Amino acid sequence: MSGALQGKVAVVTGAGSGIGRASARLFAAEGARVLAADVSEAVEETVRGIVAAGGQAIARRVDVSKPAEVAAMIAAAKGELGGLHVVYANAGVSGGGERLLQITPEQFQQVLGVNLLGVFYTVQAAAAHMVEQGSGSLIMTASVAGMRANAAGIPYSASKAGVISLAQTIANDLRGTGVRINAICPGLIETGMTQPVFDYARARGNEGRLGQLCLLARAGAPEEIAKVALFLASDAASYVHGQAIPVDGGLSSTHPFLPPRNK
């Protein structure tokens, strides 16, 4: 490892599994002191793994849809780990795939509460500290579903489109502060959220069709998203600001198409 985050403090939400867990592990391996946050107790396992590998991390149970809990999380990073340099607002929920007329107000509000408001609360609380110190990297998980239709359900897609907008509008608001903000737009990644899709395909013997619309003709792994998050967190991305970066095996580069059959 290169030590790209040596001496820095990083907060990762949604760190109990999937992209968040992979990112927390990688950040720690690259030298960061990590506050791993999740609403689930699985975040404790993430931290145990980091510590066992020789890294530094603490766990915190946080519901990012509650501003007071988010504020306490950011304060804990500064108070217990001694700073705040990177915040990866990754926590999210899928929200299901119901058609328009079957979606209830409660469902829509719950998805936006975590995926959009939770991200906003996280970056707002972190920015208050980072602007004062004149530096920092804010990263958010959006999705290719926020760029175009038919990648996920309506509430999820709307929430992720909002995150893309946050990357652009907050970047302009942070003009000249030294604080950067960017979003990552994953494609089909095998995580706890998408596991039912993968399990269903495998049960039917269709695993080879997963990710078939991607130009790389495969699904992605959480670690592949974590590597992009590491880049955005590090000084290597010092001139990257206000961007929504697809990491999707080429899926969003083209219009819908039927892939040629293997001969």
Image (cartoon, helix red, strand yellow):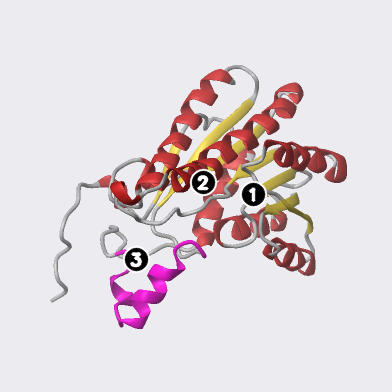
Quarter residue 204 falls in:
bottom left
Would you say residue 1 is visible in this rendering? no
Residue 233's label in the rendered image is none
Q: Which residues are magenta?
A: 192-211
Q: Which is more N-terminal, label 1 or label 3? A: 1
Task: Check the picture and name the quadrant holding the C terminus.
Answer: bottom left
- Give the residue number, with chain letter if any, for mark 3: 218
Is 143 in the magenta? no
- Give the residue number, with chain letter if any, for mark 2: 110
Q: Nearer the viewer, mark 2 or mark 1?
A: 2
Q: Which is more N-terminal, label 1 or label 2? A: 1
Asked if the residue under mark 1 is in contact with the one under mark 2, i.e. CB atoms within 8 Å, the reply is no
The amino acid on which the numbered mark 1 sits, given as a three-letter code, is Thr
Q: Is residue 167 left or right of residue 48?
A: left
Q: Which is more N-terminal, label 2 or label 3? A: 2
Find numbered disc 3 in the image and state the secondary structure of the residue it sits on.
loop
Per the model, the C-alpha gap separating discs 3 and 2 is 31 Å
